[in-house]
Amino acid sequence: MKYFKRPEWLRPHWMLALVMLAGSAAFPAHAATTPLDHIVAVVNDEVITRQELTRRYNDIVQSLSRQNTPLPPREVLEKQLLERMVTELCLQQHARNTGVRVDPTQVERALQRIAAQNKLDIAGLQAAMEQNGQSIDTMRTTIRNEILIARARERDVDNRISVNDSEIEGYLQTLVQQGVETEYNFAHILLTLPENASPEQIQARHARAEEVLNQLRNGADFAQMSASYSDASNALQGGAFGWRASGKLPEMFVEALKPLQPGQISPLLKSSNGFHILKLNDKRGLDATLNVTQTHARHILIKTNELTSESDARNRLLQLKERIDNGVKFDELARLHSDDASAAKGGDLGWINPGDTVPDFEKAMDALKPGEVSAPIQSPFGWHLIQVLERRDQDVTQERQKLLARQAIRERKAEEAFQDWVRQIRDSAYVELRPID
């Protein structure tokens, strides 16, 4: 298997902390009087407190201010944040209750990456966060919870998505009929409907969606309205989707975006998930021929778990590398020792395009000359020895089209399935919302 990047479904809160560190001098921690703590929500057998909501509110205020996004009224934003915290807690509980576990070393690696991006070590990161009124332990908890949710999504949603060859052929034929595929840069507001919503609930959500749409058409800021009303996971990032190929979008979205000019707002759209409003930022065509340098590589993977620590995995690979350096064949050792599905093929990963593998793996692979074997390198999947066999320049336009088609169909299916999964978990939980103040 190739080590493909995971699609991003939710911007991690620790990334917000990263942004805050970068600009903490210009934007000091939000000053607010902390009220006496009390419970603002009960979610199954856990609670969310007023102080937890206040901390989240202060973080979001800093982030929105840094993006020059007008702030919604405090009571509106707090209500939105509380609903988001309830949903996240439901997902965390589901993950834990169904056996998902997070290795503490993964959390520490994430902290180390944040520190490195800020040109700090862990001690420096902690000092910078404390100076900005934040806690590194809180960040650890946030990262751990996000990994929990991501793993549960991968197991329950992403791994159950399949794309067959006929779907790919149909997608490509549609592109031929349409001419050059279009990419859209747009933002999105979603007002969800509960599963099996009553006519009264549908009518109430429709009325709210119409109210939001009217405010947007009268000049309201889209990012502010997203932060105030959207139930989508990217609501607090202004609902921004960035660039998406038309094939990766629901047909309903494509039909709504086609006639729009940059800056325009779509009509109200209804799906099984709820009501949608789109804003087109820009659009462009995809017609470029693609030539890339491909790498033919193989590897040996040692996964870490309860029985194999990080140091154990690295030491095993050091011993294997010494044997390879002394003349033992790489493929023979891969068949005997690799934990990857490629072991049966001597660790052969075939021809790899730029971007096919996770950054840590690709960086180490690109640094090797043909025939050279890497030192043990770490990735989110474990520890690897990598050997580059050969390289070539290749026109991958057709191959890329099929790959993009598969990715587009898979992402579209996964996003729809994910929204249904979140709604089902949220609707099956016991939730009691209490007065915030």
Image (cartoon, rainbow, N blue to C red):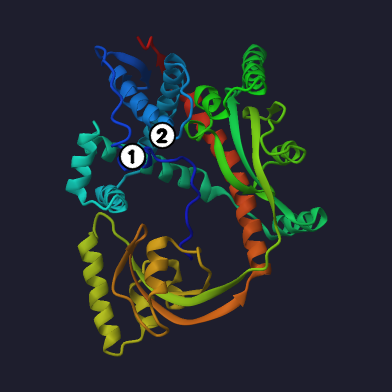
Residue sitting at the far bottom: 327
Which residue sits at x=37%, y=70%?
A: 364
Residue at the image position 79 percent from the left and 56 percent from the top: 179
Q: Residue 81, relative to residue 433: is it above or below?
A: below
Q: CA distance from mark 1 to mark 2?
A: 8 Å
Q: Is residue 412 above or below residue 52?
A: below
Is residue 45 among what the camera can see?
no
Residue 198 placed where, x, y %?
A: 64, 15
Query: Tag 2: residue type?
Result: Arg
Residue that mark 1 sits on: 23
User: Looking at the image, how many numbered discs can be counted on the residues?
Assistant: 2
In the picture, measured across the screen, residue 436 lies left or right of residue 135, that is: right
Residue with the most extreme front position: 26
Labels 1 & 2 near each other (Cβ < 8 A): yes
Q: Is residue 28 left or right of residue 393?
A: left
In the structure shown, which secondary structural element does the residue marked by tag 2 occupy?
helix
Residue 177 image-quadrant placement: bottom right
Is any atom of residue 275 visible in this view?
yes
Mark sitting earlier along the chain (1/2): 1
Q: Secondary structure at mark 1?
A: loop
Q: Position of residue 84 (x, y in %)?
A: 44, 27
Position of residue 257 measured from the top left corner of the image (x, y, whole percent): 72, 39
Category of crowding for the residue at label 1, using alpha-carbon neighbours closer than 10 angstroms: few (below 14), some (14–19), many (at least 20): some
Query: As shown in the figure, which amino acid type bears the numbered disc 1?
Result: Gly
Residue highlighted by disc 2: 66
Where, by quadrant of the figure, is residue 265 drawn? top right
Q: For the C terminus, give its image quadrant.
A: top left
Pick whichever, 154 or 210, lies toward us: 210
| Rendered position, 215 above or below 132 | above
